[in-house]
Amino acid sequence: MLISRSRGAAIAVAGSLLVSGFAVSAQGTPEASPVASPAASPVAEPLGAVSVVASATVPNDLMVDGTLVGGLSGIDYDPESGQWIVLSDDRSDSAPARSYALELAYDESAITTLELTGARTLLQADGEPYPNAEAGGNVPDPEAIRFDPLSDAIWYTSEGSYELDINPFVAASAEDGQFIAAPAVPEIFAMSGGAAPEELGPRENLVFEGLSFSADGQSLWLAMEGPLFQDGEPSTFETTSLTRITNLDRAGNVLGQYAYELDTLPEEPTAFATMGMTEILAIDDDRFLVIERGGIETPEAFNNYIKVYEVDISGATDVSDLASLADGSFTLASKTLVLDLNATDVTPIDNVEGIAWGPDFVNGNRSVVLVSDNNFSDTQVNQFIVLEVEG
């Protein structure tokens, strides 16, 4: 979520269960079932030109299953079932934390179907919905969501908050929202509160904003929205900043970690301003699509700046052993601009936070869908934008 809003105990599940081919150990560690076979990794080919096909919005007062639709921060598509899912970043304030089933269809020229058809409450290990800050407890801040390519599970992230003493986490659920498991989170991402003299760990609201499965489906990629305290200051109008992209196995062990340089702020701010990575989407073993979102408050308006980059880690240094990026010597992940949304005809340009591969077009080109988070604000929109990737 763009606006500022929440260090705690890790989630665990006792016992052992099997949910549609998704095995969970007694320690609550998600694993791919032995019967599941990973999809072949895509061949590394140059990404073609990316262009906008169409965009559409859903009303800010839309109610689905008695819940207000808003804060759409994550989106994903399951090519096997043809299902779409979107995630609200509601911190259980207007309704318990939830995802929505989405009916979405489009062709090379227009969006033909756009309908949210059902709300699915996300549940904790005890089977109860996540609480809000007033109730207290494990208050969520959901930001990214993905279908598991090797099972029927659905994975999502929560940013956590040092203000509420809650750590960020990644969790797996069944399709109906029932909790399955949550792998351990690397200690470097534990909230410290940024208290002097040691400012360590994530900043408030700049944590697990992006999530993607690896191309073979065996591991997870986590994207930090902004820099850890020890990695330097956030971007300004004159300076860039560094954040981390982390590869985890299904038990939460770090397989690799890479430094990513965020852009400078796109204009001089007069009040609140932010620059961050809001989502990551695997292309192949080494490449991703990444959304960078800049938000600038001025006396006249709040302006969003959205860019999509192709990111390559093949030549980057594994920085998982570096406690701080501020002093280290390493090679960054490379990035190439593939779409500047502000240079297109899309209007308005809102708070884009989600990205997913969709079904291929009839012409054989790949499709990508973006979704924007309206922050439950009357002045913003829940927007879906369809892109076409040539070749």
Image (spheres, rainbow, N blue to C red):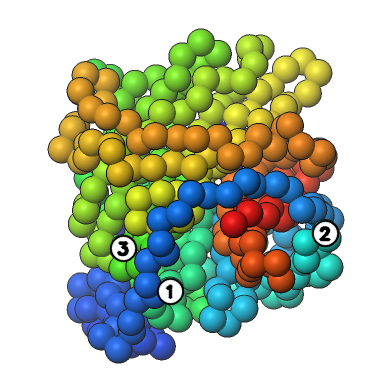
The residue lying at 74 percent from left, 60 percent from top is 68
Q: Residues within 10 Å of mark 1 (few under 14, many from 20)?
A: many
Q: Residues within 10 Å of mark 3 (few under 14, many from 20)?
A: many
The residue lying at 54 percent from left, 81 percent from top is 80
Q: Is residue 94 above or below residue 23?
A: above
In this rendering, would 141 be left or right of 52? left
According to the image, label 2 marks what residue? 109
According to the image, label 1 marks what residue? 149
Q: Position of residue 137 (x, y in %)?
A: 42, 55
Specify the quadrant that holds the N terminus.
top right
The residue lying at 28 percent from left, 38 percent from top is 315
- Disc with the residue nearer the chain's start (3 vs 1): 1
- Disc with the residue nearer the chain's start (3 vs 2): 2
Type of residue at label 1?
Pro
Type of residue at label 3?
Ser
Q: Is residue 355 above or below residue 269?
A: below
Type of residue at label 2?
Ser
Specify the quadrant that holds the C terminus.
bottom right
Q: Position of residue 317 (x, y in %)?
A: 23, 36
According to the image, label 3 marks what residue? 219
Q: Position of residue 372 (x, y in %)?
A: 68, 48
Quote the CA–CA distance across marks 3 and 2. Answer: 35 Å
Quote the CA–CA distance across marks 2 and 1. Answer: 29 Å
Q: Is residue 85 above or below residue 275?
A: below
- Disc with the residue nearer the chain's start (2 vs 1): 2
Q: Secondary structure at mark 2?
A: loop
